[in-house]
Amino acid sequence: MTIILMRTATAGALAAQADNLPLQPQSAGQILCAGILGNGVARLEEAVRLKIPFVLDNPAQRRNRDMMAQRQQLNERLMAEKAERILLRAYEKAGGSVPDKITLQFRALSAVEHLKQQTLQQGLLVYSQKLLFDASLPLEARLGLFKSMKVDEFEPHSASVALAVGRLPSLPAYTVADLIRSFDHTWRPLSFRLDGGLTSWIETAKPWLVEFPLPSLLASEMARADQFDATGYSENATLGLGFFLLSFDEKRNYFDIVTPYLFATRLRRDQEVPMRYSKYYKLEQQHSVTTSYRQLAELTHGAGRKKLARLEVCSKCGTIFSKDRADLAHPSC
Ligand SMILES: [Zn+2]
């Protein structure tokens, strides 16, 4: 995963070199790592060890650009400090004249600008949900990583960062399996076709669970939504849960995509009122003429398909479970 960051860093370093700045790809990687992860991860090596899920999500390729507006926020101050130290070392090592402090700072800022441009152009991001719901890391460590992504001088740039700094209430659960088990009548459908409730839809549809879909999968947009907006009078947050449920209607040749997500809002002047989540799931359909349909068909029917888990509902106790995943197992009752 870190290879994705390295690629962006290399492109940034080459652009900086063309601009006569002595910036090596490795150093560019360290600067970019600090820019994205803040002080929480001191070095790129640490990001590799923690398997930070970097991903490319080019906003120009998305259907709903508002929904997935570029949400990368770089800690440019931290980047500039690091770049200054790195460039100074490079000039000293080269043995020529070392630029004065002001010149060095300007050059550091130019290096940062090259990295920033590459980051935004390529859409380099941390895959929030993949990190937030990664059961292999203790919850505190996961939230700590998001906390350090908050840039001091700005409002949180995403719901996951807002959550980590205490601007949003705790989530109903912190793993995909626990989130699925939390589905009950408090989750509200946004389509009359799901009026019978999510559990009864799962019972009939026996959907596939598509977990942490790649951004290139068009149907993943809502699952990957991670927005926090505190620019107006109100505060709003939308957080997808990193998965959607998928079923195929053979008769009508449709894919049904059911995506659960959380929404929270409040007027700022009412800040005393605690924020609460509204829990929704929306239904989308993809017909065979759409690109999204073809992508989904490849996922579920195609040659190189990954094995997706299917969800079922226990007819005795109503528990949602899967025979294909240990964390969703349900011993017969
Ligand atoms: Zn049961």
Image: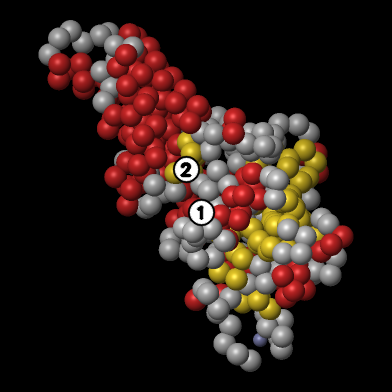
| Residue at 67%, 34% in the rendered image | 65
**In the shown orientation, is residue 278 left or right of residue 28?**
right
The amino acid on which the numbered mark 2 sits, given as a three-letter code, is Val
- Where does the image place residue 32, in percent across and percent down from the top left? 39, 32
Report the residue that reaches farthest toward the left. Answer: 95
Give the label, 1 or 2, closer to the camera: 2
Residue 78, located in which quarter of the rendered image?
A: top left
Please say if the residues under marks 1 and 2 sit with CB atoms less than 8 Å apart: yes
Quadrant for the C terminus in the image: bottom right
Q: Earlier in the sequence, mark 1 or mark 2?
A: 2
Q: Which residue is drawn at 43% across and 19% down?
A: 113
Give neighbour class at mark 2: few <14, some 14-19, many 20+ (Cα, 10 Å): many
Please name whichever residue, 330 or 184, is drawn nearer the observer in this view of the structure. 330
Q: Distance between the residues labelled 1 and 2?
A: 10 Å
Residue sitting at the far bottom:
333
Q: Which residue is drawn at 43% across and 33% down?
A: 35
Q: Find residue 263 and name its label.
A: none
The quadrant of the rendered image in which ligand 1 is seen is bottom right
Disc 1 element: helix
Question: What label sits on residue 130 in the rendered view?
Answer: 1
- Residue shown at 73% from the left, 57% from the top: 254
Q: Does the rendering let one see residue 63?
A: yes
* Residue bearing the label numbered 2: 55
